[in-house]
Image: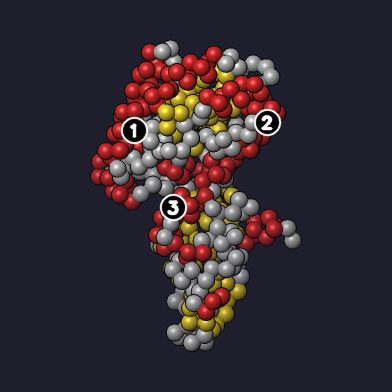
Amino acid sequence: MKLETFYMSHTWVEISASALKHNVASIRDLIGEERKLIAVVKANAYGHGLAQVAEVIEEAVDYFSVATVDEAQTLRRHGIKEPILVLAYVPEEPGMINWCREERVEVTVSSLGQAERLARLVKDGELRVQVKIDTGLGRLGIPAAEAVAIAHQIAKLGSLHIKGFFSHLADPFGNITYTKKQLEEFSLARGELERAGFDSQLYHLAKTTAILSLPDSWHNAVRLGIGLYGIWPASELEHFVKKEKPDFSLQPVLSWKTQVLQVKDYPANSFVSYGCTYQTRRQTRLAIIPVGYYEGFDRGLSNRGQVLINGTRCPVRGLVCMNMTIVDITDAGRVFEGDEVVLIGQQGDEAITAHDLAEMAHTINYEIVSRINPLIERKVVD
């Protein structure tokens, strides 16, 4: 049996089309129709399924942004027509660069040297680019103070067409003093660029956190990432927004499910899983499920995680294995092989969120969803 077939029959991810559309509409109502809405679908749409997500929301957004050209090619293969921005580094290979030119895929430029190399690779016409400005994150980007000079030099290269300028906030809801500094740097750079003739370009700085808490960061476009998927970047932000905007809501898009492989009764005082890190305290009923850290069920959930079976929270016992995990179903009623197991989502009156798993695993909800193995089938529902 092929690995993909095994996953499709035992473990799957459900993507709610209605939740995706709700989240896009909520953000659109917030920012207004005059701004461009860029949907960030990098990293397999934060683990949700790149093509599946894009096909649902294409008509409701203005742009897509991805991390790699491979992701852009996937979108085009699935018939996505909207402009695409590649946020990360693009290999300087003639065929790839000219594919981007032909397919209206915009490339991020982070230095003059990179721009010059790209320009030499363009065979015909113009390659669309967006210039990354570093306002204080310390990753890719040109210094804000040099934006005008470098933009003019890029424009003079002839084969590159600047479509936009953007930057990235380091800590928009936490370190507000530093954030204000970044906002000011980008606004000053934008003003200078527009006075220098770059007044029809996109300018975007706001990601989900800033969209929800800092209207001054919106400019004429925003990048909707984690919020697109109904996941709050931080619980503190969720509390703030719900207090300030009681009618605003985001709906979780992803549910992750599997099935019970085996049920067994285990005696008291018996060790469970590798390393003997858990010992039963009573006669225990265990269920083995076909997900482990290879599938994206974090090893940090060992002896801490929970899953839902029969609407009951069932704790992980012992270490999470590469392809299997053992859970305690003693208090979950009658459980049989093939019964549904919810890793993320709702079952009965209980729910486990990506945030819940992140807290259990001592990580962030971004990592929980983006690391779900891409071989696992994504099914679009409702």
Task: Tell me the mark number nearer the camera, choosing from 1 and 3.
Answer: 1
Decide: is 60 above or below 379: above
Sequence-first tag of 1 and 3:
1
The percent coordinates of residue 2 (x first, y second) are: 73, 58
From the viewer's perspective, is 42 left or right of 35?
Answer: right
Q: Answer with the quarter of the image where residue 106 lies.
A: top right
- Which amino acid type is shown beneath numbered disc 3? Asn
For the point 29% across and 34% down, which residue is it? 180
Q: CA distance from mark 3 to mark 2?
A: 35 Å
Disc 1 target residue: 182
- Which amino acid type is shown beneath numbered disc 2? Glu
For the point 30% across and 45% down, which residue is it? 174
Disc 3 target residue: 365
From the viewer's perspective, is 220 left or right of 236?
Answer: right
The answer to whether residue 232 shows anywhere in this view is yes
User: Are the residues flagged by discs 1 and 3 in contact, CB closer than 8 Å?
Assistant: no
The percent coordinates of residue 351 (x first, y second) are: 42, 60
For the point 65% across and 56% down, which residue is it? 8
Label 1 SS: helix
Q: Residue furthest left?
A: 243
Q: CA distance from mark 2 to mark 1?
A: 33 Å
